[in-house]
């Protein structure tokens, strides 16, 4: 989907009007923000009031063009965050994920590392009373967030505004669980299996077991976030329930790496969205090409 088409989609479905709107953005760090940033800046350039909320310490986030940036304090430094992510990536890269056990270990380790980090961010933002009051008083039309971290989804539920999620593959498959998408394990391979859509009986069995474990994996990943959300919203709830309220989900998947599967009407595929815009080819005159061909023939 082209950038202009995606922006118009957000305009009509989320802001509800061709008039400029007020959009709250709560991104996730790293490549998640790198992929979302061009969209956010373009929405701001087109006259929308875009407010981006980020932690004071992060790997890649900072002020962006045509937007207002607000920050909240976090209990770690950028150096500590870099060290944690570096050690985590070293483990993932050194683990053989071609084996079933290796894939399970990487999935488990990734969720444990993510759980600790995202809980710190969620508590830091949600209990910044002055900032949360500012966001409530702003009266936003919608929130754009990456549910890779739970804080944005909780804020959207608190403010009671339409939530637009922009997804990359979620560690526990929450993007498909919360949307109630059919997920036939007989031909949709789970992550870290390296299976294709043509599996023998053994692989279908392993794939089915992993699919059945997905809800348990999500419950473990969100165990602390569920408690924070329930305490902050002052009602018994869970992240899977909150994420099921998405008004629209933008699925930032690369079609070259995904298998066809059923999706819901509010799920929009935007594969290739993270790809750098290609540069135009250098201009070569036809006259020079003809001269070179003539000289080579001689």
Image (cartoon, helix red, strand yellow):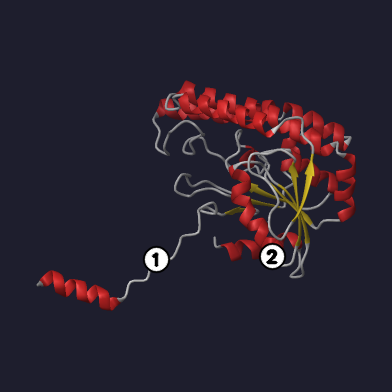
Picture disc at residue 45 = 2
The vertical placement of 36 against 297, above or below, is above
* Residue 2, horizontal then vertical, whole percent: 55, 63
Q: Is residue 104 above or below residue 47?
A: above
Marks counted in the figure total 2
**Residue at x 41%, y 37% (from the top left corner):** 196
N-terminal label among 1 and 2? 2
Q: Is residue 182 left or right of residue 160?
A: left
* Callout 2 crowding tier (Cα within 10 Å): few <14, some 14–19, many ≥20: some
Mark 2 element type: helix
Query: Who is closer to the viewer here, 139 or 16?
Result: 139
| Residue that appears at 52% across and 29% down | 208
Image coordinates of residue 273 in percent, x first then y, are 55, 54
Quadrant housing residue 22: bottom right
- Residue where numbered disc 1 is placed: 281
Quote the CA–CA distance across marks 1 and 2. Answer: 27 Å
Pointer 1: residues within 10 angstroms few (<14), some, or many (20+)? few
Mark 1 near mark 2, Cβ–Cβ under 8 Å?
A: no
The quarter holding residue 153 reads: top right
Can residue 136 be spotted in the picture? yes
Left/right placement of residue 4 relative to residue 230 reads: left
Q: Position of residue 267 (x, y in %)?
A: 62, 52
Of 53 and 109, nearer the camera is: 53
């Amino acid at each position: 989907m082209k950038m202009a088409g995606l922006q118009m989609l957000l305009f009509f479905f989320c802001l509800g009007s061709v008039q400029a709107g007020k959009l709250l953005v709560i991104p996730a760090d790293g490549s998640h923000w790198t992929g979302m940033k061009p969209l956010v800046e373009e929405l701001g350039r087109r006259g929308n009031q875009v407010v981006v909320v980020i932690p004071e310490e992060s790997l890649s986030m900072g002020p962006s063009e045509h937007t207002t940036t607000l920050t909240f304090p976090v209990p770690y430094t950028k150096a500590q965050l870099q060290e944690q992510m570096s050690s985590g990536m070293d483990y993932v890269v050194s683990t053989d994920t071609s084996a079933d056990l290796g894939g399970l270990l990487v999935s488990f380790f990734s969720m444990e590392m993510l759980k600790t980090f995202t809980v710190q961010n969620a508590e830091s933002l949600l209990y910044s009373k002055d900032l949360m009051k500012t966001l409530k008083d702003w009266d936003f039309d919608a929130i754009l967030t990456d549910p890779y971290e739970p804080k944005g989804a909780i804020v959207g539920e608190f403010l009671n505004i339409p939530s637009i999620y922009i997804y990359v593959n979620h560690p526990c498959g929450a993007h498909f669980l919360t949307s109630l998408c059919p997920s036939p394990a007989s031909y949709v391979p789970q992550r870290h299996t390296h299976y294709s859509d043509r599996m023998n009986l053994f692989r279908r069995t392993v794939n089915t077991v992993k699919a059945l474990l997905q809800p348990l994996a999500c419950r473990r990943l969100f165990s602390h976030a569920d408690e924070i959300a329930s305490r902050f919203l002052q009602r018994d709830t869970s992240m899977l329930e909150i994420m099921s309220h998405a008004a629209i989900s933008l699925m930032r998947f690369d079609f070259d790496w995904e298998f066809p599967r059923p999706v819901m009407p509010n799920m929009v595929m935007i594969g290739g969205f993270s790809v750098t815009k290609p540069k135009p080819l250098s201009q070569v005159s036809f006259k020079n090409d003809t001269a070179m061909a003539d000289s080579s023939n001689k």
